[in-house]
Amino acid sequence: MKLDPSIRDHMLAAIPNLRAFAYSLCGNADRADDLVQETLMRAIDKIDHFTPGTNLNAWLFTILRNHFRSEFRKRKREVEDVDGKHADRLVSQPNQVGRVEFEELRVALATLPESQREALILVGASGFSYEEAAEIAGCAVGTVKSRVNRARARLAEMLSVEVGEVTADQQMRAMIGEAAG
């Protein structure tokens, strides 16, 4: 089966956002790349299930999210790196303020409930509208707005910043500041 060039181009354009979302879910760049690759392979394999004219990005993000959750359920039963030696080798100390701020944000994000973190990433970092995020998450628009609002408030509290405050770190502003939607 040959993939329509416009759909292929749209899929290729979605890769950076898919990768960012995947990284936000798993916290590992290699694993995020694997999730994106698997998402694209599944999308191509099931392209006949996609309805032309609908939101391809939302469809791709849904595939990625569902695949991540399926793998997460499987991995809960697995035991990896019991003694922590492998993880210790991967640690690198931040050497600049931006990296420290990003690490603080990452840690704070990890403490949010999954539903709030997912809504915040979709709306704040990936640029989806509330309606698109609701479609991806499979819930009402109001639910997404509420989750994003609670997540922003909690992050602002944990990071000791005011919602909407301009910080040096652009990623932090995207996550905590007001998003279009």
Image (cartoon, helix red, strand yellow):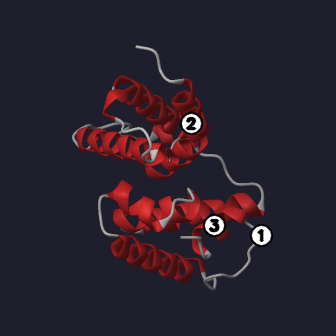
Q: Vertical placement of 164 versus 67: above or below? A: below
Give the residue at mark 1: 168
Side (left or right) of 100 relative to 30: right
Which element type, helix, strand or loop, lies under badge 1? loop
Q: Residues within 10 Å of mark 3 (few under 14, many from 20)?
A: some
Residue shown at the point (48%, 45%) measured from the top left: 57
Q: Amino acid at mark 1?
A: Ala
The picture places residue 146, in percent across and down from the top left corner, at 39, 78
Residue shown at the point (43%, 49%) measured from the top left: 58
The answer to whether residue 13 is seen in the rendering is: yes
CA gap, disc 2 and disc 1: 32 Å
> Mark 2 vs mark 3: which is more N-terminal?
2
Give the residue at mark 3: 174
The answer to whether residue 118 is seen in the rendering is: no
Numbered label attached to residue 10: 2
Choose between 73 and 135: the one closer to the eye. 135
Mark 2 near mark 1, Cβ–Cβ under 8 Å? no
Q: Amino acid at mark 2?
A: His
Choose between 85 and 42: the one closer to the eye. 42
The picture places residue 151, in percent across and down from the top left corner, at 46, 74
Q: Residues within 10 Å of mark 1 (few under 14, many from 20)?
A: few
CA gap, disc 2 and disc 3: 24 Å
The picture places residue 99, in percent across and down from the top left corner, at 70, 57
